[in-house]
Amino acid sequence: MTEAEADQELFLRIHSGDEQAFVSLYRKRQGSIFRFALHMTGSETAAEDVTQDVFLAIMRDTGYDPSRGTISAYLFGIARKLVLRHVERGRSDALLESELVQGVLPELAASENPLAELTHRERIEALQRAVTALPRRYREVVVLCDLEELDYADAAAVLRCPIGTVRSRLHRARELLFAKLNQERQRPPAAMKPARCAT
Amino acid sequence: MSGEEMDQLTAGLKAVAADLRRVEAPGRVEERLVAAFRERQTPVVPRVPEPRRAWWVPVAAWATAAAAGTALTVFLTRDHPAVPVRQPARSMMQLAVADPGADAEVISADDSGFILLPNAESISPNEEVDVVRVEVPRSAIVALGLPLTEETATEKVTADIALGADGLAHAVRILE
Protein backbone atom coordinates (compact mmCIF):
# COMPACT_ATOMS: atom_id res chain seq x y z
CA MET A 1 0.00 0.00 0.00
CA THR A 2 1.43 3.38 -0.99
CA GLU A 3 1.52 6.32 1.36
CA ALA A 4 -1.24 8.03 -0.62
CA GLU A 5 -3.44 4.94 -0.35
CA ALA A 6 -2.74 4.69 3.38
CA ASP A 7 -3.79 8.32 3.79
CA GLN A 8 -6.92 7.68 1.79
CA GLU A 9 -7.85 4.74 3.99
CA LEU A 10 -7.31 6.88 7.09
CA PHE A 11 -9.53 9.54 5.57
CA LEU A 12 -12.33 7.02 4.98
CA ARG A 13 -12.00 5.68 8.51
CA ILE A 14 -12.15 9.22 9.90
CA HIS A 15 -15.52 9.67 8.26
CA SER A 16 -16.80 6.47 9.78
CA GLY A 17 -15.97 7.92 13.21
CA ASP A 18 -12.55 6.35 13.84
CA GLU A 19 -10.73 8.66 16.26
CA GLN A 20 -7.49 6.71 16.04
CA ALA A 21 -7.44 7.20 12.26
CA PHE A 22 -7.90 10.92 12.77
CA VAL A 23 -5.03 11.08 15.25
CA SER A 24 -2.81 9.04 12.91
CA LEU A 25 -3.47 11.30 9.94
CA TYR A 26 -3.00 14.39 12.08
CA ARG A 27 0.35 13.23 13.47
CA LYS A 28 1.52 12.24 10.02
CA ARG A 29 0.63 15.50 8.27
CA GLN A 30 0.44 18.27 10.86
CA GLY A 31 4.12 19.15 10.71
CA SER A 32 4.23 19.86 7.00
CA ILE A 33 0.96 21.81 7.12
CA PHE A 34 2.19 23.85 10.09
CA ARG A 35 5.54 24.62 8.41
CA PHE A 36 3.85 25.56 5.14
CA ALA A 37 1.54 27.94 6.96
CA LEU A 38 4.46 29.30 8.97
CA HIS A 39 6.48 30.01 5.84
CA MET A 40 3.54 31.63 4.13
CA THR A 41 2.21 33.73 7.01
CA GLY A 42 5.37 34.28 9.03
CA SER A 43 3.40 33.89 12.24
CA GLU A 44 3.39 30.93 14.59
CA THR A 45 -0.04 31.91 15.88
CA ALA A 46 -1.46 32.06 12.37
CA ALA A 47 0.22 28.77 11.46
CA GLU A 48 -1.33 27.16 14.52
CA ASP A 49 -4.77 28.47 13.56
CA VAL A 50 -4.37 27.31 9.97
CA THR A 51 -3.27 23.82 11.04
CA GLN A 52 -6.21 23.51 13.37
CA ASP A 53 -8.68 24.77 10.75
CA VAL A 54 -7.33 22.39 8.10
CA PHE A 55 -8.01 19.37 10.28
CA LEU A 56 -11.35 20.72 11.44
CA ALA A 57 -12.26 21.08 7.77
CA ILE A 58 -11.45 17.48 6.93
CA MET A 59 -13.42 16.39 9.98
CA ARG A 60 -16.48 18.03 8.46
CA ASP A 61 -15.79 17.69 4.75
CA THR A 62 -16.35 14.47 2.86
CA GLY A 63 -15.81 16.09 -0.53
CA TYR A 64 -12.32 14.76 -1.22
CA ASP A 65 -11.90 13.65 -4.83
CA PRO A 66 -8.99 11.19 -5.32
CA SER A 67 -8.83 12.00 -9.03
CA ARG A 68 -7.69 15.53 -8.16
CA GLY A 69 -4.67 14.58 -6.05
CA THR A 70 -3.54 12.88 -2.90
CA ILE A 71 -4.83 13.55 0.62
CA SER A 72 -1.60 15.40 1.25
CA ALA A 73 -2.30 17.74 -1.68
CA TYR A 74 -5.86 18.11 -0.47
CA LEU A 75 -4.65 19.22 2.98
CA PHE A 76 -2.14 21.65 1.50
CA GLY A 77 -4.89 23.02 -0.76
CA ILE A 78 -7.09 23.79 2.24
CA ALA A 79 -4.11 25.28 4.09
CA ARG A 80 -3.29 27.50 1.12
CA LYS A 81 -6.83 28.86 1.01
CA LEU A 82 -6.72 29.62 4.72
CA VAL A 83 -3.33 31.29 4.36
CA LEU A 84 -4.61 33.49 1.52
CA ARG A 85 -7.59 34.44 3.67
CA HIS A 86 -5.24 35.30 6.51
CA VAL A 87 -3.04 37.45 4.25
CA GLU A 88 -6.10 39.19 2.79
CA ARG A 89 -7.29 40.02 6.30
CA GLY A 90 -4.29 42.28 6.60
CA ARG A 91 -1.61 40.21 8.24
CA SER A 92 1.10 40.76 5.59
CA ASP A 93 4.43 39.04 5.33
CA ALA A 94 6.03 41.76 7.46
CA LEU A 95 6.46 39.46 10.42
CA LEU A 96 8.22 36.76 8.51
CA GLU A 97 11.77 37.51 9.58
CA SER A 98 10.97 38.42 13.11
CA GLU A 99 9.01 35.28 13.96
CA LEU A 100 10.06 32.64 11.51
CA VAL A 101 13.82 33.04 11.36
CA GLN A 102 14.52 34.19 14.87
CA GLY A 103 11.81 32.51 16.86
CA VAL A 104 11.08 29.14 15.38
CA LEU A 105 14.39 27.75 14.22
CA PRO A 106 15.69 25.08 16.54
CA GLU A 107 18.61 26.12 18.67
CA LEU A 108 22.08 24.84 17.91
CA ALA A 109 22.82 21.51 19.41
CA ALA A 110 26.06 20.93 21.29
CA SER A 111 28.70 20.15 18.67
CA GLU A 112 32.31 18.97 18.53
CA ASN A 113 33.04 21.67 15.96
CA PRO A 114 31.02 24.71 16.94
CA LEU A 115 32.61 26.98 14.33
CA ALA A 116 31.72 24.67 11.47
CA GLU A 117 28.27 24.31 12.95
CA LEU A 118 27.94 28.06 13.17
CA THR A 119 28.91 28.47 9.52
CA HIS A 120 26.41 25.81 8.53
CA ARG A 121 23.82 27.54 10.63
CA GLU A 122 24.51 30.89 9.06
CA ARG A 123 24.15 29.43 5.61
CA ILE A 124 20.83 27.87 6.50
CA GLU A 125 19.56 31.09 8.02
CA ALA A 126 20.69 33.07 4.99
CA LEU A 127 18.87 30.68 2.69
CA GLN A 128 15.82 30.79 4.85
CA ARG A 129 15.82 34.58 4.76
CA ALA A 130 16.08 34.40 0.99
CA VAL A 131 13.07 32.04 0.83
CA THR A 132 11.15 34.38 3.08
CA ALA A 133 11.94 37.34 0.83
CA LEU A 134 10.53 35.65 -2.26
CA PRO A 135 7.23 36.91 -3.67
CA ARG A 136 4.37 34.73 -2.45
CA ARG A 137 3.77 32.86 -5.74
CA TYR A 138 7.42 31.77 -5.85
CA ARG A 139 7.72 31.20 -2.14
CA GLU A 140 4.82 28.76 -2.05
CA VAL A 141 6.25 26.64 -4.85
CA VAL A 142 9.67 26.48 -3.16
CA VAL A 143 8.09 25.55 0.17
CA LEU A 144 5.91 22.87 -1.37
CA CYS A 145 8.43 21.29 -3.76
CA ASP A 146 11.82 21.93 -2.15
CA LEU A 147 11.10 22.10 1.56
CA GLU A 148 8.08 19.79 1.91
CA GLU A 149 9.08 17.62 -1.05
CA LEU A 150 5.73 17.39 -2.80
CA ASP A 151 5.91 16.04 -6.34
CA TYR A 152 5.01 18.36 -9.19
CA ALA A 153 1.61 16.77 -9.76
CA ASP A 154 0.56 17.33 -6.15
CA ALA A 155 1.99 20.85 -6.17
CA ALA A 156 -0.02 21.57 -9.32
CA ALA A 157 -3.16 20.27 -7.57
CA VAL A 158 -2.49 22.52 -4.56
CA LEU A 159 -1.75 25.60 -6.66
CA ARG A 160 -4.50 24.78 -9.17
CA CYS A 161 -2.26 25.25 -12.16
CA PRO A 162 -0.65 23.00 -14.80
CA ILE A 163 2.50 21.04 -13.95
CA GLY A 164 4.43 23.10 -16.51
CA THR A 165 3.60 26.23 -14.56
CA VAL A 166 4.90 24.61 -11.37
CA ARG A 167 8.18 23.77 -13.12
CA SER A 168 8.64 27.24 -14.57
CA ARG A 169 7.78 28.97 -11.28
CA LEU A 170 10.18 26.74 -9.40
CA HIS A 171 12.95 27.47 -11.88
CA ARG A 172 12.33 31.20 -11.56
CA ALA A 173 12.16 30.95 -7.77
CA ARG A 174 15.55 29.23 -7.60
CA GLU A 175 17.09 31.92 -9.79
CA LEU A 176 15.72 34.57 -7.45
CA LEU A 177 17.05 32.68 -4.44
CA PHE A 178 20.47 32.39 -5.96
CA ALA A 179 20.56 36.08 -6.80
CA LYS A 180 19.50 36.94 -3.25
CA LEU A 181 22.22 34.74 -1.72
CA ASN A 182 24.84 36.35 -3.98
CA GLN A 183 23.72 39.77 -2.81
CA GLU A 184 24.17 38.69 0.80
CA ARG A 185 27.64 37.32 0.14
CA GLN A 186 28.78 40.57 -1.44
CA ARG A 187 27.40 42.68 1.42
CA PRO A 188 30.06 43.78 3.97
CA PRO A 189 29.87 41.64 7.11
CA ALA A 190 27.78 43.08 9.89
CA ALA A 191 28.71 42.96 13.55
CA MET A 192 28.67 39.36 14.69
CA LYS A 193 25.59 38.38 16.65
CA PRO A 194 25.95 36.06 19.59
CA ALA A 195 25.02 32.52 18.64
CA ARG A 196 22.35 30.65 20.56
CA CYS A 197 23.86 27.51 21.93
CA ALA A 198 22.15 24.82 23.90
CA THR A 199 24.30 23.31 26.57
CA MET B 1 22.89 29.78 -12.91
CA SER B 2 25.22 26.90 -13.66
CA GLY B 3 24.53 23.24 -12.89
CA GLU B 4 26.98 23.30 -10.00
CA GLU B 5 25.36 26.37 -8.51
CA MET B 6 21.98 24.72 -8.86
CA ASP B 7 23.28 21.64 -7.00
CA GLN B 8 24.61 23.85 -4.21
CA LEU B 9 21.30 25.60 -3.92
CA THR B 10 19.37 22.30 -3.89
CA ALA B 11 21.68 20.96 -1.18
CA GLY B 12 21.17 24.14 0.82
CA LEU B 13 17.38 23.86 0.52
CA LYS B 14 17.56 20.24 1.66
CA ALA B 15 19.53 21.35 4.67
CA VAL B 16 16.89 23.98 5.46
CA ALA B 17 14.16 21.36 5.06
CA ALA B 18 16.00 18.97 7.37
CA ASP B 19 16.59 21.73 9.87
CA LEU B 20 12.92 22.67 9.94
CA ARG B 21 11.68 19.09 10.10
CA ARG B 22 11.51 19.37 13.87
CA VAL B 23 9.19 22.35 13.70
CA GLU B 24 5.66 21.15 14.41
CA ALA B 25 2.32 22.44 15.61
CA PRO B 26 2.08 22.77 19.40
CA GLY B 27 0.55 19.82 21.26
CA ARG B 28 -2.49 21.86 22.28
CA VAL B 29 -3.70 21.83 18.66
CA GLU B 30 -3.98 18.04 18.73
CA GLU B 31 -5.77 18.18 22.07
CA ARG B 32 -8.30 20.67 20.75
CA LEU B 33 -8.86 18.70 17.57
CA VAL B 34 -9.37 15.39 19.36
CA ALA B 35 -11.88 17.09 21.66
CA ALA B 36 -13.68 18.50 18.63
CA PHE B 37 -13.66 15.08 16.97
CA ARG B 38 -15.19 13.44 20.05
CA GLU B 39 -17.80 16.15 20.28
CA ARG B 40 -18.79 15.55 16.68
CA GLN B 41 -19.11 11.81 17.21
CA THR B 42 -21.32 12.16 20.28
CA PRO B 43 -23.61 15.09 19.67
CA VAL B 44 -24.87 16.52 22.92
CA VAL B 45 -28.64 16.47 23.23
CA PRO B 46 -29.65 19.54 25.17
CA ARG B 47 -31.62 18.60 28.28
CA VAL B 48 -34.95 20.28 28.55
CA PRO B 49 -35.44 21.19 32.19
CA GLU B 50 -38.61 19.75 33.64
CA PRO B 51 -41.10 22.42 34.67
CA ARG B 52 -41.32 22.76 38.43
CA ARG B 53 -44.55 21.42 39.79
CA ALA B 54 -46.25 23.36 42.52
CA TRP B 55 -47.48 21.33 45.49
CA TRP B 56 -51.06 22.40 44.93
CA VAL B 57 -51.34 20.99 41.39
CA PRO B 58 -51.95 17.34 42.39
CA VAL B 59 -54.19 18.49 45.27
CA ALA B 60 -56.31 20.56 42.90
CA ALA B 61 -56.47 17.69 40.40
CA TRP B 62 -57.74 15.26 43.06
CA ALA B 63 -60.26 17.81 44.38
CA THR B 64 -61.61 18.42 40.88
CA ALA B 65 -61.93 14.69 40.27
CA ALA B 66 -63.79 14.21 43.56
CA ALA B 67 -66.19 17.06 42.80
CA ALA B 68 -66.90 15.71 39.34
CA GLY B 69 -67.57 12.24 40.79
CA THR B 70 -70.00 13.65 43.36
CA ALA B 71 -71.84 15.67 40.73
CA LEU B 72 -72.15 12.63 38.50
CA THR B 73 -73.50 10.50 41.33
CA VAL B 74 -76.11 13.11 42.24
CA PHE B 75 -77.13 13.49 38.63
CA LEU B 76 -77.54 9.75 38.08
CA THR B 77 -79.51 9.12 41.26
CA ARG B 78 -81.97 11.99 40.73
CA ASP B 79 -85.52 11.33 39.48
CA HIS B 80 -85.41 12.45 35.88
CA PRO B 81 -88.60 13.43 34.15
CA ALA B 82 -87.13 12.77 30.77
CA VAL B 83 -84.65 10.25 29.41
CA PRO B 84 -82.89 11.42 26.31
CA VAL B 85 -82.63 8.74 23.69
CA ARG B 86 -80.34 9.15 20.74
CA GLN B 87 -82.09 7.91 17.62
CA PRO B 88 -80.46 7.08 14.33
CA ALA B 89 -80.84 9.80 11.79
CA ARG B 90 -82.73 7.55 9.37
CA SER B 91 -86.22 8.22 10.80
CA MET B 92 -85.35 11.89 11.20
CA MET B 93 -84.66 12.09 7.52
CA GLN B 94 -88.20 11.02 7.06
CA LEU B 95 -89.27 13.92 9.30
CA ALA B 96 -87.34 16.21 7.06
CA VAL B 97 -89.36 15.33 3.99
CA ALA B 98 -92.64 16.13 5.71
CA ASP B 99 -94.76 18.91 4.41
CA PRO B 100 -94.18 21.85 6.74
CA GLY B 101 -97.58 23.28 6.09
CA ALA B 102 -99.50 20.25 7.32
CA ASP B 103 -100.25 20.95 10.99
CA ALA B 104 -100.71 18.02 13.31
CA GLU B 105 -100.25 15.64 10.47
CA VAL B 106 -98.83 12.19 10.93
CA ILE B 107 -95.67 12.49 8.93
CA SER B 108 -94.03 9.16 9.18
CA ALA B 109 -94.05 7.09 6.08
CA ASP B 110 -92.99 4.01 8.02
CA ASP B 111 -95.40 4.51 10.87
CA SER B 112 -92.82 5.94 13.24
CA GLY B 113 -95.72 7.86 14.73
CA PHE B 114 -94.15 11.34 14.87
CA ILE B 115 -96.52 14.25 14.52
CA LEU B 116 -95.19 17.58 13.41
CA LEU B 117 -95.91 20.22 16.03
CA PRO B 118 -98.08 23.17 15.08
CA ASN B 119 -96.06 26.08 13.68
CA ALA B 120 -92.80 24.08 13.98
CA GLU B 121 -90.35 24.23 11.14
CA SER B 122 -89.64 21.06 9.30
CA ILE B 123 -86.26 19.43 9.89
CA SER B 124 -83.87 19.94 7.05
CA PRO B 125 -82.19 16.96 5.38
CA ASN B 126 -79.08 15.65 7.20
CA GLU B 127 -79.92 17.70 10.27
CA GLU B 128 -78.96 15.95 13.45
CA VAL B 129 -81.96 15.35 15.67
CA ASP B 130 -82.20 14.37 19.30
CA VAL B 131 -85.16 12.37 20.55
CA VAL B 132 -86.06 12.88 24.19
CA ARG B 133 -88.49 10.64 26.00
CA VAL B 134 -90.73 12.48 28.47
CA GLU B 135 -93.84 12.05 30.56
CA VAL B 136 -96.32 14.85 30.13
CA PRO B 137 -99.92 15.44 31.30
CA ARG B 138 -102.39 14.34 28.67
CA SER B 139 -103.89 17.86 28.74
CA ALA B 140 -100.58 19.31 27.57
CA ILE B 141 -100.79 17.61 24.26
CA VAL B 142 -104.47 17.78 23.65
CA ALA B 143 -103.71 20.07 20.74
CA LEU B 144 -102.31 17.08 18.88
CA GLY B 145 -105.72 15.47 18.84
CA LEU B 146 -105.29 13.12 21.74
CA PRO B 147 -108.69 12.09 23.22
CA LEU B 148 -109.25 13.69 26.61
CA THR B 149 -111.85 13.19 29.27
CA GLU B 150 -112.22 14.74 32.68
CA GLU B 151 -110.95 11.58 34.34
CA THR B 152 -107.93 11.22 32.15
CA ALA B 153 -106.90 14.89 32.05
CA THR B 154 -104.33 14.52 34.80
CA GLU B 155 -102.92 11.28 33.52
CA LYS B 156 -99.44 11.32 32.24
CA VAL B 157 -98.54 9.94 28.90
CA THR B 158 -95.13 8.93 27.65
CA ALA B 159 -94.00 10.64 24.47
CA ASP B 160 -90.89 11.08 22.36
CA ILE B 161 -90.04 14.62 21.37
CA ALA B 162 -87.84 15.25 18.35
CA LEU B 163 -85.48 18.17 18.98
CA GLY B 164 -83.80 19.84 16.04
CA ALA B 165 -80.23 21.13 15.85
CA ASP B 166 -81.53 24.46 17.15
CA GLY B 167 -82.71 22.73 20.33
CA LEU B 168 -86.44 23.33 19.63
CA ALA B 169 -89.07 20.62 19.55
CA HIS B 170 -90.23 19.82 16.04
CA ALA B 171 -92.34 16.69 16.40
CA VAL B 172 -93.90 14.44 18.98
CA ARG B 173 -94.63 10.75 19.09
CA ILE B 174 -97.16 9.51 21.64
CA LEU B 175 -96.12 6.16 23.05
CA GLU B 176 -99.18 5.52 25.23
Image: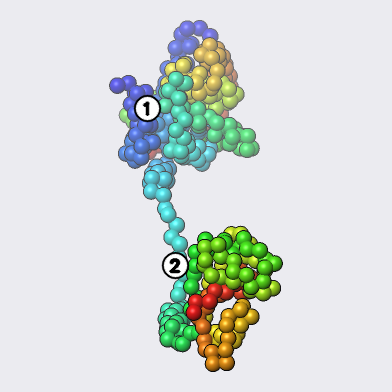
> What label does residue A102 carry, if any?
none
Q: Nearer the viewer, residue B172 or B44?
A: B172
Could you say which is closer to the camera, residue B79 or residue B119? B119
At x 45% / y 75%, what residue is drawn? B53
What chain letter is assigned to the residue under label 2? B
Image disc number at residue A8? 1
Q: Are marks 2 and 1 on the same chain?
A: no
State the residue at coordinates (63%, 38%): A89
Res A195 seen here: no
In which image quadrant can residue A10 be found? Answer: top left
Examine the rendered structure and indicate whether residue A58 appears above or below residue B161.
above
Task: Name the residue beneath numbered marker 2.
Answer: B50
Quadrant location of residue A191?
A: top right
User: Which residue is farthest top?
Assistant: B2
The x, y position of residue B112, in whole percent, is 52, 67
In the displayed structure, A122 sits above or below A156; it is below
